[in-house]
Amino acid sequence: MLLGASLRARFAEAAGRTDVEFPEDGYHGAYVVEMAVDLARAPEQSPELGSDVEMGKISGRLPAVEGSPAKWMELPAQESSARFGDYAILRLIKQQRQILGRFGLVFDTWYLESELHATDKLESTLERMRKGDHVYEREGAVWFRSTDFGDEKDRVLVKADRSPTYFLADIAYHASKRDRGFEHAVDIFGPDHHGHIARLSGATQALGLAADWLEILILQQVNLIQDGTTMEMSKRAGRLVTMDQLIEEVGADVAKFFFLVRRNASHLDFDLDLAKKESNENPVYYVKYAHARICSVLRNAEARDFDAMTVSEEDLGRLVHDAELALLRFLPELPAVVVQAATTREMSRLTQYAVDLAQAFHQFYHQCTILGEDQALSRARLALCRASRIVLANTLRLIGVEAPERM
C-alpha cells in the first residue's frame, strides 16, 4: 500500500533513520508527516486513536492496530508498510467522520470496501456477469464487454495476475447496494470521471438492473481563490487545503452555502476573501442578516407594545406597495423550489431562492416604514415580517445553515 509505505518512510525520517527511502510516487501531504510525528513521539507504545464519533454505522470491519511503530519497523518492508497503512486508514476514517460532523454532513452508513472482499462479493458479482455472457478472457485477464453498453472499449475486471481491478470492486459495491434493498442509486463523480459513466451504467445493466436504476451526477471543479489568485493543489504532492482547514477559516455555514450556490455543471471559484467578508457582497452574510434584521424588527415591535400577532384581512389589504407585493410573491414559492431542487438534484435552487428572498425583504425594509403611526398598516407589515422570517428560516434549515436572531 502506497499510503502505508509513505507513512513508514516519514516515521523513519521522524525517528532520525536514513535507511528507508520515500516511495517514488508516495504521498507528500502534511497529514502524512503529522501522523508520522505523532507516532514517533512514543514509538514503543501502541498508538492511541481516541474514541470514534457517533455518526452513522460502519458496515464492515476496520483494520485492527496492534503493536507499536517500532515493532512494525522490524517487519519485512511490505508487511511493515501494511501495518502503517492500517493505522493510516483507521486514523483518516476517524478524522473524516469528525470533520463531516463539524460540517453537518451525516451518512447513515459507512460501507467499507473491505466488506466486499470479506463477503466474497467480488467473486459472486463476477459470476453473475459471467452467466449473462457479459465477460470473456483474453491474455490471461477477465474483461467486461462494456462496448455492448456504449463504452469506447472493453474494460478489465481481473488482471492477468488474478488480482481484481478497482472497477470490479465498484460493480460489486453497486450489486451490494441493490441487494440491500436500494431501489435507486445516485453516484456523484468529479469532473475527470466522465469516462466512467458508460462503463459503470453498463455494468449495472449487465447485473440485470434497470437502465435508470443508477443515476450519475457530475460535479465540476472547485477552485480556491485567495488574494485574486487560484491556489494550486495536489493531494499527492501535499499542496492542499483540507475541509477541516476550510471550516476553520470561513466556518461551516459559509463553506456549505458557497458549495451549494453553484449549479452542478458549473465550475466554482470559491473566493476565500469574499467568504470572510461581513458585507452584502457575501451572499451568506446577506441572507443571514435578512433573518437577523427581521428578528430585530419583531423585538422592537414587542418593546413598543405593537400587537404583532393580531392582523385582519382588512389590515392585510393595505399591503399594496410594490416592495410589499414583490415580497409577498416570493413567500409561497418555497414548496415548489424544494420540489424542483429535489427532482433536478440542483441544490443551487435553494441557495438562489434564499438570496432572492433576502433581497426582496431588504428592499421592503428600506422602502416601507414598518412601525409607523398607522396601526393597521403596521400590523400588516409585521405579519409580512413574521411570514418572511418563517420562510427564510425554513430555507436556511433545508440548506443546513443557521438562521441567527442577532448579528
Image (spheres, rainbow, N blue to C red):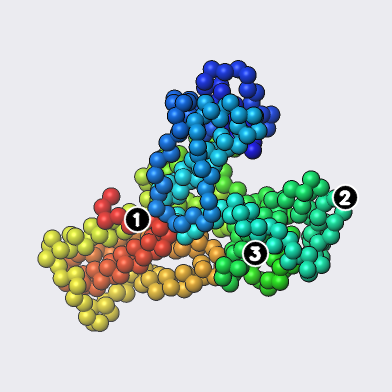
Task: Classify 374 as above or below 282.
Answer: below
Of the image marks 2 and 1, the number of the one nearer the N terminus: 2
**Res. 139 mark:** 2
Q: Nearer the viewer, residue 111 or 190?
A: 111
At x 84%, y 60%, the residue is 136
Q: Position of residue 1 (x, y in %)?
A: 64, 38
Label drawn at residue 288: none
Mark 3 / mark 1, whichever is N-terminal: 3
How dense is the environment of label 1, judged by Cα within 10 Å: few (below 14), some, or many (20 and up)?
A: some
The residue pinned by badge 3 equals 175
Reply above or below: 402 against 185.
above
- Alpha carbon separation for disc pair 2 and 1: 58 Å
Tell me the distance, in whole angstroms, between the alpha carbons under discs 3 and 1. Answer: 38 Å
Q: Secondary structure at mark 2?
A: loop
Q: Residues within 10 Å of mark 2 (few under 14, many from 20)?
A: few
Q: Secondary structure at mark 1?
A: loop
Q: Which residue is mark 1?
A: 402
Position in image of residue 357 (x %, y %)? 39, 63
**Horizontally, is 81 left or right of 388 in the view?**
right
> Which is more toward the observer, 360 or 54?
54
Kind of residue sitting beneath label 1 = Glu
Which mark is nearer the camera, 3 or 1? 3
CB atoms of marks 2 and 1 within 8 Å = no
